[in-house]
Image (cartoon, rainbow, N blue to C red):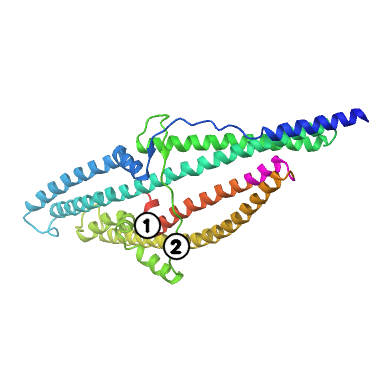
């Protein structure tokens, strides 16, 4: 009987000691420079090879346009009088179309890069919090395993229960490794985007403020219908049809070209334009409903957070009164951290989706 009391007392003392050392001293992070979204965007624009190439393409297209204009000025006949004149006029119109297309492509590339930088910037924030929560979950699983081992040693838990604690600890370890890897990859992509050095980290200071979409369903349909007329979407949709239209407008019969084939080529290109614009309109409508669904889920998460905050307040009080162990308190705190991670991710996803809804060309390939 005395040995049994000694064992129970030893177990209790061990558990108390473990509860007392659950908290760890935070490791101070190395100081990194602060980087705002505006600063990150400026660096991305400055270092982007794509933007530099787009500017070079404009210069090249301008030179070709000026040369084609000079060729037209030396043609004594109209473009429909002979094949040579037709070819020169077609070359001029194609060069003009190419020049204005390159200018549009340049401006579009800038907007898309700004959007890509915003995505990468806040993706790091999402994955940083995901890693922090994964670390807390792993520490909690290790605590649970240590207690499970003690309980099994003193006959207070079955081998099956202990094995479940081992499996849970291993699962949380894998999730933590995955979260770290995901964050490392996000930093690599971000550094490449802004032209930073390998291993260079920053404190990303800007935060997103959640703003619900203020647009009725009726106005959404009007927005979807009008968006295809925007300069960028017109460029993306009609890029392939420009040469077909010029060939049709300045057609001159030769042994290698027929009017019927040229006409059919233009019709096919116009159908493609219609399908592309309809695709943009459909995408805008789908994004609207995705935003609404996300906003509904967000409100539910906020309500759940309020409940968890109250649960944590009660758990802290119970812990002070000795009614629950620190393990239970930390479990409640972890629940709240996981929910806050989800809420932050939803706020970022909502902001980016809202921007794509208003400007669908941001996610289009230029």
In this rendering, position of residue 307 left or right of residue 3: left
The disc label shown at residue 213, or none: 2
Tell me the residue at 29%/42% (across/down): 51
Question: Which quadrant of the structure image shows residue 245?
Answer: bottom left
Quadrant of image for the N terminus: top right
| Mark 2 to mark 1 CA distance (whole Å) | 14 Å
Q: Position of residue 34 (x, y in %)?
A: 39, 38
What kind of element bears circle 1? loop
Instruction: State yes or no: discs 2 and 1 in contact (Cβ < 8 Å).
Output: no
Q: Residue furthest bottom?
A: 218
Q: Is residue 98 magenta?
A: no
Q: Position of residue 135 (x, y in %)?
A: 59, 37
Tell me the residue at 84%/36% (across/down): 156
Query: What's drawn in magenta, residue-wise?
Result: 323-333
Q: Is residue 111 visible?
A: yes
Tell me the residue at 31%/59% (across/down): 234
271, 27: nearer the viewer = 27
The disc label shown at residue 359, or none: 1
How crowded is the residue under tag 2: few (<14 C-alpha within 10 Å), some, or many (20+)? few
16, 228: nearer the viewer = 16
In this rendering, position of residue 327 left or right of residue 38: right
State the predominant SS element of the stretch in magenta. Answer: helix
Tell me the residue at 59%/54% (across/down): 305
In this rendering, position of residue 7 left or right of residue 77: right
348, 228: nearer the viewer = 348
What kind of element bears circle 2? loop
């Amino acid at each position: 009987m005395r040995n049994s009391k000694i064992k129970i007392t030893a177990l209790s003392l061990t558990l108390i000691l473990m509860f007392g050392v659950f908290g760890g001293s935070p490791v101070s992070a190395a100081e990194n420079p602060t980087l705002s979204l505006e600063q990150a965007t400026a660096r991305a624009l400055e270092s982007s090879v794509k933007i530099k190439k787009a500017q070079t393409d404009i210069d090249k297209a301008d030179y070709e346009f000026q040369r084609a204009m000079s060729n037209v000025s030396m043609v004594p006949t109209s473009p429909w009088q002979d094949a040579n004149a037709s070819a020169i006029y077609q070359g001029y119109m194609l060069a003009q179309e190419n020049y204005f297309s390159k200018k549009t492509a340049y401006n579009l590339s800038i907007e898309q890069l700004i959007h890509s930088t915003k995505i990468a910037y806040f993706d790091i924030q999402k994955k940083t919090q995901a890693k922090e929560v994964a670390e807390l979950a792993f520490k909690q699983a290790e605590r649970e395993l240590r207690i499970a081992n003690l309980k099994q040693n003193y006959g207070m838990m079955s081998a099956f229960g202990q094995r479940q604690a081992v499996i849970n600890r291993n699962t949380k370890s894998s999730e933590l490794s995955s979260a770290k890897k995901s964050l490392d990859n996000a930093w690599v992509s971000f550094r490449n985007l802004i032209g930073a050095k390998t291993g260079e980290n920053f404190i990303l200071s800007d935060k997103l403020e959640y703003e619900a979409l203020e647009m009725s369903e009726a106005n959404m349909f009007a927005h979807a219908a009008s968006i295809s007329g925007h300069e960028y979407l017109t460029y993306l949709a009609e890029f392939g049809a420009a040469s077909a239209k010029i060939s049709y407008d300045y057609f001159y019969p030769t042994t290698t070209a027929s009017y019927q084939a040229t006409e059919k080529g233009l019709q096919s290109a116009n159908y493609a334009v219609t399908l592309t614009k309809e695709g943009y309109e459909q995408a805008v409508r789908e994004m609207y409903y995705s935003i609404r669904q996300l906003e509904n889920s967000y409100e539910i998460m906020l309500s759940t957070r309020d409940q968890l905050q109250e649960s944590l307040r009660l758990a802290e009080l119970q812990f002070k009164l000795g009614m629950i162990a620190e393990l239970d308190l930390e479990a409640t705190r972890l629940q709240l951290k996981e929910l806050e991670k989800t809420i932050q991710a939803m706020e970022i996803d909502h902001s980016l989706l809202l921007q794509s809804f208003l400007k669908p060309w941001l996610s289009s390939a230029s």
